[in-house]
Amino acid sequence: MIISLFGPDGVGKSTITNELLDMGWFVFSGTDIINWPDKSWSESFVAQGIDESSLDEDKHFIEKIRRSHKLAIELQRKHEVVVIDSDPMHKTLVHDYLRSLPNKLAGKKMMKKRYNQFKEITNDLIIHVFFQISDSLDDHDQAKLLQDRVSSRGKIAYFDPKDVEESLERIHACRELKSLLEAAGEKVLTVTMDGTFDAKKFGQNLTQ
């Protein structure tokens, strides 16, 4: 089973992945290639003096999607459950939407078009898990909480939200992505991070 996690920056995915690791699941970051089992791709960027984490090129995003999903399939042969934390497919779709703002309709159309494109290089059997702060708290309050968490990390990464408004936009973009995946017939599970996360129950829900 391959599980792919997504949600706005600061929602708490890293905390969850630590619990999933404790359950014996294999977890890897789809975007942090320096920590992939095969480090050859990452080392090629280092040799060229390129900061791969700041590359903002569509060709690179597509290659990262292809490689990360191929890696997940390879890892599945050795591990019962493989988890992609920060799937580059999700990340790229979210940023496609964000680049279309303030035209939300254009963002939705672009996200759908790109999703159809990416399906040719991704695994059809992935279970998508959407993480949200709350299903009742005001969106702006959620954005403030998310931005506080992102800011507390110290140096803000290239693709991280820079302020509350950008965190708010990511909340909306992730919801649009969830809706798109559901409309496409993908298996999507929603986890709300307003209580204690039960890793065992989470695992049971995925296998139902």
Image (cartoon, rainbow, N blue to C red):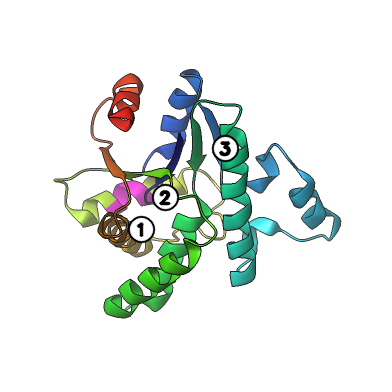
Verify CB contact (< 8 Å) between mark 2 and mark 1. Answer: yes
Which amino acid, mark 2? Asp
Indicate the position of residue 36 as horizontal and vertical percent values.
Answer: 67, 40
Label 3 or label 2, whichever comes before in sequence order: 2
How far apart are labels 2 and 1 at the CA level? 7 Å
Which amino acid, mark 3? Phe
Q: Quadrant of the N terminus?
A: top left
Is 207 left or right of 118, judged from the image as shown? left
Inspect this view and state whether residue 185 appears.
Answer: yes
Is 39 left or right of 78, judged from the image as shown? right
Residue 188: say if magenta: no
Indicate the position of residue 52 as horizontal and vertical percent values.
Answer: 69, 58
Say which residue label 3 marks.
Answer: 28
Q: Secondary structure at mark 2?
A: loop
Packing grade of label 1 (10 A; few <14, some 14-19, many >=20) is many
Q: Quadrant of residue 192?
A: top left
Q: What range is drawn magenta here?
A: 143-147
Q: Residue at x 32, y 56 (%)?
A: 181
Packing grade of label 2 (10 A; few <14, some 14-19, many >=20) is some
Which amino acid, mark 1? Ser
Say which residue label 2 marks.
Answer: 9
Say which residue label 1 marks.
Answer: 167
Inspect this view and state whether residue 31 appears.
Answer: no
> Nearer the observer, disc 3 or disc 2?
3
